[in-house]
Each structure stands twice: as structure tokens, then as C-alpha cells.
Image: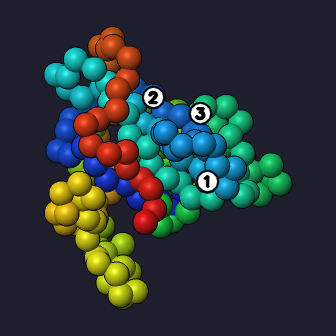
Amino acid sequence: MGRLGGMKGGGFLNNVDGTLVDYEFTQTFPGEAEDPDQLFVVLTVAPDGAAENVQTTLRLGSAQFLQVQDPHTVVNPEGGAARFWDKSDGYHFLESLEKAGVVDGGIDESDPSIIALTGMIGRRMRFVQERDEERMAARKKAGKNPNRVDEATGKEYPFTRLIVEQVYDTAPVSAAPRTAPTRGAAKPVGRAS
């Protein structure tokens, strides 16, 4: 998988076709204080036929060796290769994007200390939730409930992560103008458990 080194996620974008209209690297999970030790990517998606854009947040891993240079770029200030944690939701999302045909998601291989994923902006794709068998097996092995439990209802659900099943275009497309991005009705995703 090369420089992507790790990621995971799950939530409300399931079997949805849409255009990825923007992304932002951040050290702040929605509704929480900035965490200098964590790195997230916030994806903004324009689902086909929806009146508003939606956002989801995926964890990329530790920010110990990565610094957010601007909303679209992270760098390794030490000059070494910039990598994401290969067990994170974000990593698996970007890995699936590569498998679907967006080579390196726009990563510039000429400077391995920089990751900028602008090549995925404007791409129309199918978003799906994949069962996170790896996470569930690890939880079971540790003696924990392998499923996610909804605190409000007590119902159990399998852990899932957001991936791209298919990319429909060979080049970015222009999404129709939408209202300001909103969070989906489901809880934010991508937090490690």
C-alpha cells in the first residue's frame, strides 16, 4: 500500500453514490478539543440527489511525526516519509480509493515527507460500509464484545469502516453547488475503540 501505512471508519455513507467535494486534515475530532497526538481527515461528500453535503471524520493515527501544514497537506517535519497508521479508518479508506483506481489519491511521490490528497477531490464514487473483521477479531481475542453497542438502545452492531467500492470517472467532475456541509444523522465515525 506504500505511503498510506494505515486507516478505518464506518457510518452513514453506505451504498451511496456521490462526489467527494473536499477533505481537511485536522487534529480536532468534531465536538472535541484539539489533540496534538491525533490526526484525522474530514471528508465532505455530495451524495447524488441530496440537497446538502455530508461530512464524516476518519482517524488517520498518531500526529507524532506529522504536522498539518494546511487543510489539504500534512508533512513530516523531520523530513522522513509521511505515513498514516495502517490500522486506522482513514488508511483503509485511502487504500480502497487506490484499489478503485485513484492512484495514491494524489500523493506526490517526488517528496515523501508530504502527503496532499487533492487528486481525490471532485471524483464521483460509490461509498460503502465494510465489516471490520480485523477489529472485531482483535476485540474478541482481548475478551471484549466484538460488536459495537449503541449506548441509547443497547443494540449490538458489527464494527464497519468506510471504503470506496468503485470510482465512476477517470478525472474529477464538478459537483452541483450545495448548502453548507452537515453531519449525518449517525454518530461521527472513525474513533478508535
Select label 1 or label 3 by which is in front: 1
Residue at position x 74%, y 51% in the image:
76
Please tell me how crowded label 3 is: few (under 14), some (14-19), or many (20+) other residues with Cα within 10 Å: some
Which of the marked residues, 1 or 3, is nearer the chain's N terminus? Answer: 1
Residue 55: quarter of image: top left
Image coordinates of residue 37 in percent, x first then y, are 67, 55
Q: Which residue is mark 2?
A: 22
Image coordinates of residue 142 in percent, x first then y, are 40, 86
> Which mark, by number, is residue 72?
3
Q: Which residue is mark 1?
A: 38
Residue at position x 23%, y 49% in the image:
128
120 or 87: which is nearer to us? Answer: 87
> Which mark, by number, is residue 170?
none
Which of the marked residues, 2 or 3, is nearer the chain's N terminus? Answer: 2
The amino acid pointed to by label 2 is: Asp
The amino acid pointed to by label 1 is: Gln
Residue at position x 61%, y 31% in the image:
71
Q: How is the image coloured?
A: rainbow
Image coordinates of residue 90 in percent, x first then y, are 46, 52
Q: Is residue 14 left or right of residue 9?
A: left
- Cα separation between marks 2 and 1: 20 Å
The amino acid pointed to by label 3 is: His
Q: Secondary structure at mark 2?
A: strand
Please tell me how crowded label 2 is: few (under 14), some (14-19), or many (20+) other residues with Cα within 10 Å: some
Select label 2 or label 1 by which is in front: 1
